[in-house]
Amino acid sequence: MTRATLLVSIALLLAGCGDSVPPRAGGPRTVVLISLDTLRPDRLGAYGGADGVSPVLDAFAQEAAVFDQALAPAPWTLPSHLTMLTGLDTSAHGVLNAGRSLSGKVVTLAESLAGAGYRTAAFTDGGFVSARNGVNDGFQVFDDERSEEGPNGFTRLLPKALDWLDDRSADDSFFLFLHTFDAHTPYDSPPEETLEQFRARPVDHDPRDAKLRHLRWFYQQTKVGLTNYAQIDAVLNDYDAGVHHADQGVGQVLDKLRALGRYDDALIIVTSDHGEAFLEHGLHVGHGVGIHDDELRVPLMVKFPGGEGAGERHEELVGLVDITRTVLDVEGLEPDTNTQGESLLGLARDKPRRTNWILGSSTNTRTFFLVANDWKYVAVPGVDPFRSAYAHLGPATPTSITLPQVEAEYETRLPSGESIPRAYDQTGDPLAIQDLMPGNEQLFNRRADPDELHDLAGVDEERLTQMRELFQSRQQASDAINTDLIDLNADDFTEIDPAEQRVLAALGYLGTQSKDNYKGVPPKMRTWAFNRHEGPDMTALHEGDSLLHEVRLKVAAGETPSASELARFADIALSFGLWRRENLKHRARVDWRLYELIELAAEVDAPLDKAALLKEIRDN
């Protein structure tokens, strides 16, 4: 029996005696951790978002310490939550893919609190926040049941959680963990009245609208309903509806704590496991693939007991890895010797922060990264971009193109085990996947370039070398912890049962189970750092995409395009043709656009020399 298991066994034995566990000195303690899955901070009013989306959390921010530069260690649910609940970064706890489970040697936050006499309970929305991967370790009550019929989210789990709170005696110290997918895809899952409220907001043109239409060539994006939207503002309205529904759920929890007289002295942490990309980098809507801050930055609000540090904003770099040490520090408990991170209580007390880095990884691209101060370093990925895209996005060459001889056929494997045949022209790369997914070392100055649009890896060699060396030292330290914790004789690969597979498929996850070791970087991939891929300038194509999409929106709304808009078809054709002649190596990126240009011109009766365009495509 491990030390962690022994601690929980003692707590469970005491809890089963019929009497409350005696509170520690200072009276009963209240610890609540709420994870609002897939929540970008910039959608909250407290982080500069629109009014009315998150009134509960906006008010809560006035009573909590708010951390403006909090990062997740991974852009997807499982590894981030295990970091949150263990105080170990992804390399240290080692659960880098869905088939892995937490080592029994890891002492979780729940185990530490249960061992100290706290009642522990978790009510989660299922999926990857489940017992299958060890998320339940230390929780005396663990509910991860997710209905295939619905409803789920806070609608399902809050009544159980509030009942559990009502059942606590005045002398109970307790730790409650709540998790919900309310802001997760599919975005049209909030209650109808909430959707109607947010769909009434205006929808404006956005340069990303045309890119949104292109997502129909990715199976994963169609699976979660992204192709039902014509404009990114419409996507964000539905996303905000989910955020609002989650916000109202948090309000019920806070109201219950107030009614129980627990709120003032409680330690309450509200955060998320990762953010969400909305085509800021052109690739996808969602998470799990990118290593940019749109997928990694999270809200983090901590209400300390007695209101310490209330309303203060902190710009220092912090992470989900700090949560376990923060809770144990506030509760006066010693962390396990392997625990990483740093307590946030120090910042609340105006003490300088000792830790200035966040180490993490993106399993789906087998990419590791280090953020230190203002800089982000991204290591060479362990797999080529196309293999990652095939497994987790499911791309297909636009079918309007005559498929060339270099067409690559493959199968997209679903969590259910079903395979979907796909075909993608890897050489022509019509969707520019190689430009958009990590394929080399990367370096970003997060302060000067907060959107991370300018890779400086080929510009600032000195800084790149410094960051690479710092990354290697931090990675080695985490690997050493993992070696100490991992049971090499145990088979920690966990099969996903059919019901769980269907849940993961409904949430939009493809290719989620693998026994691969994601730490290994094949030697051939290391050469990518010295043979950087340079994609062509796509500006002219994107400008044409946007103009054409505005015409499509007019047609969909029953409006007639103006004469000036129709006249621009010839200009777009000229621009696309010129781009094609200057970038023959990448002509697959423009050919399908030319076919769509011809089709749309015929639909709206725009003046266009179709025969000349088709001849150019055939002759070149």
Image (tube, helix red, strand yellow):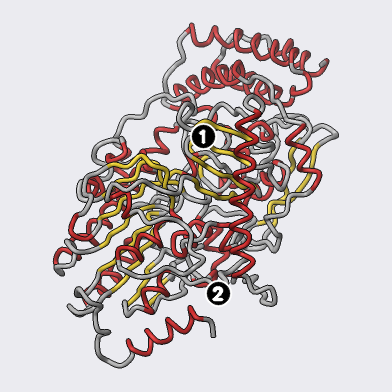
Front in this rendered view, residue 29 or 422: 29
491 sits left or right of 90 in the view = right
Query: Where is residue 411 shown, x and y percent of the image?
Result: 73, 51
Type of the residue with mark 2: Lys
Query: Where is residue 70 shown, x and y percent of the image?
Result: 41, 46
User: Which residue does the image show at 64% across and 42% down from the upper left?
Assistant: 469
513 sits left or right of 614 in the view = left
Query: Where is residue 351 shown, x and y percent of the image?
Result: 32, 48
Q: Secondary structure at mark 2?
A: loop
Say the numbered circle drawn on residue 370. Answer: none
Query: Where is residue 76 shown, x and y percent of the image?
Result: 52, 52
The answer to which image quadrant residue 231 occupies is top left
Say the numbered circle drawn on residue 279. Answer: 1
The answer to which image quadrant residue 313 occupies is top left
In the picture shown, does residue 398 fall above or below 132?
above
333 sits left or right of 379 in the view = left
Asked whether disc 2 touches disc 1, contact meaning CB atoms under 8 Å apart, the reply is: no
Name which of mark 2 and mark 1 comes first in the sequence: 2
User: Residue farthest to the bottom?
Assistant: 17
Residue that numbered label 2 is attached to: 105
